[in-house]
Amino acid sequence: MNSIGTALRLTLFGESHGELVGAVLDGLPAGMQVDVSQIAFEIGMRKPAPLIGTARREEDDVRIASGIKDGHLTGTPLLFLLPNTDVRSASYAETQFVPRPGHADYTAYVKYKGHSDFRGGGQFSGRMTAPVVAAGAVARQFLKGKGIRVAAHVVRIEDVDDSGEYEFDTVEKERFSNDIRCIGSDAAGRMRDAILRARNEGDSVGGIIRCIAVGIPPGLGEPFFDTVEGELSKMIFSIPAVKGIEFGSGFEGSGWRGSRNNDPFSYSAAEGKVVTLSNNSGGINGGITNGMPLVFRTAFKPTSSIARKQKSIDLRTFEEKELTVRGRHDPCIVPRAVIVVEAACCLTLADLYLRSGLD
């Protein structure tokens, strides 16, 4: 299905090389003030950077066709429209029947019986994240009114790590200071070099994004099945190229003992609330927020569309084919995905907050 959320419902539509892409967002309270310039700013943070991104240049002038009047929400669904203005569909003629390894060309061909829009990857393109960012920008403003803030940053590209332990305020302030969206300047330079090497070799690289949310009250989450981890994971996995997610100590913590992984409880008189002395749980216990920062990491695979020759088949004859992908593609989508991960987190937290009945 193309919709997600319970109290806050997001629906996507459009294709990469169709007339437009867009979203419907329903469930935010009437009267909420919206800064439209913030929506434009966040969409701008998704645009590709020179050299390390695709040469496709979309204007991304989002039109909000419903749900807002005089800077306030009216209570009807928000409708976001983003025209596709820079498409070159001829580059994809071969992939209609010769699927790109690693991409959704084959699975879409099977599921939709050959009728899916294959141009630019259709609905499986990263282009579909543009309306997600637009909707997420509004959800972020809702969360801001509740004292909740979200920020993400790149911590790995290929085998280059940014090993710094950055607090939320630093991430929020510095995450857009360079085109890699990496806090450590030295690591950012080495990550950029890794992306450029891959591009020059007709290849691609993946990476990891770390996301933090602070100011979340304890009690969000709807066990048994609509846990915070479960709802976030479902939303995050809708982002093209995501292959993994972990919360808190994650997979590393699976190799620890409980005495190390457990987070001792304490009471902060200064903050007037229960806290934990460590945060290996990533701010979640039993699928419910505990009031500590929510922390998760998301793994992105290398971009599927690469200029190197690869083996494939012709789906009409099942004969083996050699495919060289043409067109304009990102050698690494991880830097552009930072704002997308933030948007996904904002939308999920806003939905969980509205479901909680805290107001």
Image (spheres, rainbow, N blue to C red):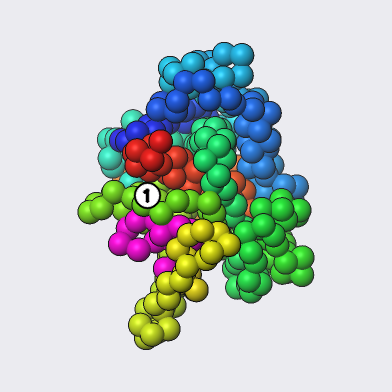
Residue 40, picture quadrant: top right
Whether residue 14 appears in this view of the structure is: no
Magenta stretch in the rendered image = 281-296
Farthest residue, direction front: 269
Badge 1 is on which residue?
220
x, y percentage for residue 86?
Answer: 64, 29
Viewer-closest of 146 and 137:
146
Where 26 falls versus 268 (above or below)? above
Question: Where the C terminus falls, by quadrant?
Answer: top left
Instruction: Identify the residue shown where x is 39% and y is 77%.
Output: 262
Viewer-closest of 332 and 251:
251
Instruction: Identify the residue shown where x is 63% and y is 64%.
Output: 167
x, y percentage for residue 221?
Answer: 33, 50
Is residue 291 shown in magenta? yes
x, y percentage for residue 151?
Answer: 60, 52
Question: Please, what is the three-letter code of the amino acid marked with disc 1?
Answer: Leu
Instruction: Identify the residue shown where x is 59% and y is 26%.
Output: 34
Q: Secondary structure at mark 1?
A: loop
Instruction: Identify the residue shown where x is 42% and y is 83%.
Output: 260
Whether residue 163 appears in this view of the structure is: yes
Question: Where the N terminus falls, by quadrant?
Answer: top left
